[in-house]
Amino acid sequence: MEKLRNLVKQAEDKKVAIGHFNISDLVGLKAIFEAAKDLNVPVIIGTSEGEAEFINRNEAAAMVKTLREKENFPIFLNSDHTKSLSEVKKAVEAGYDAILFDGGKLSYEENIKQTKEVVEYVKSVNPEILVEGELGYIGSSSKILKEIPEGVAINQEDLTSPEMAKKFVKETGVDFLAPAVGNIHGMFSKANNPDLDIKRIKSIREAAGVPLVLHGGSGIKDCDFISAINAGIAIIHINTEIRLAWRRGLEEGLKDNPEEITPYKVLPEAVEEVKKVVKKRLQLFNKLV
């Protein structure tokens, strides 16, 4: 089985991206795994601090590891938006494959300081665990938006610069970098999210020297995804879109079976709705359409 680091490098070489999808239940895991397996492409499962608390990070790690080993399939687990060293330690102990330390709301220097501490700790325990740093605040919730959240980096002067990225990577030692390039968490119900700064992505990738991760993928135009991948994005996060699909499928399952109380007879429609969204995104990211 190829290591995640190698698969990300291969994705960059092929000008494709690995899809990253968050879960908080077995419906999500089942749907994402089946979609990736149908297409035979690598996939990353993510759990935020809240999702990990609900699903139990130890159980999430065990399930993903079992799928990878028993099915001989490249599925990996990332501790998404981990905001403290204590939470990082929990993910390391549980057996996660990668960790995003989110210092996006910290000052630049404090973000460097804390991210460096996280990298040093993680690598001292297990050098194979990949660490991602976040540079620039893009919001904090995967939900339907009415307006751009306060403090999110949208103006050009607030976005991540190549110079900042280069220094950040050099001083922290992160394996991946998640920059603010016009992306935001969450999505608008009746409009696309803001356009990505493609030129900036290319400049940051060249300056930083490490693979780039695009957060807040829900709501971004398909053409922006392709341009971003060609410019240097190697991993793309989707969450809000699959939460919507989960809700839509669950409501349909309950509507079609109003008297049913057996979960496994109601939830298949939620699985199918999530799977459809994930499959569509994986096809786009891997240029299979």
Image (cartoon, rainbow, N blue to C red):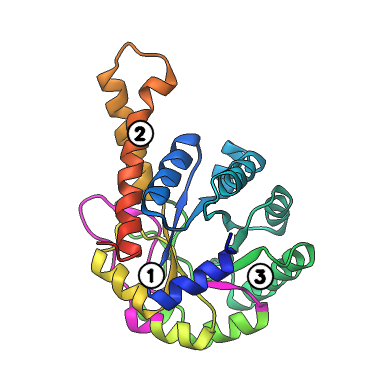
Q: Is residue 187 above or below residue 153?
A: above
Q: Give the x, y percent position of residue 153.
A: 41, 71
Residue positioned 26% across, 21% down in the render: 255
Q: Mark 3 points at which residue?
A: 115
Q: Name the residue under label 2.
A: 270
Q: Is residue 15 left or right of residue 102?
A: left
Is 179 inside the magenta-drawn segment?
yes
The amino acid sitting under disc 2 is Ala
> If the image is split into quadrants, where does the C terminus sit?
bottom left
Q: How far apart are marks 1 and 2 (CA)?
A: 28 Å
- Neighbourhood count class around disc 1 (C-alpha, 10 Å): few under 14, some 14–19, many 20 upward: many
CB atoms of marks 1 and 2 within 8 Å: no
Q: Give the x, y percent position of residue 213.
A: 47, 68
Q: Is residue 52 above or below residue 16?
A: above
The amino acid sitting under disc 1 is Val
The amino acid sitting under disc 3 is Thr
> In the picture, residue 169 is in which quadrant?
bottom right
Query: Which of labels 1 and 2 is toward the front?
Result: 1
Q: Give the range drawn in magenta.
A: 172-201
Work out whether residue 44 or residue 51 is closer to the camera in this orientation and state it.
44
Q: Mark 1 points at which residue?
A: 16
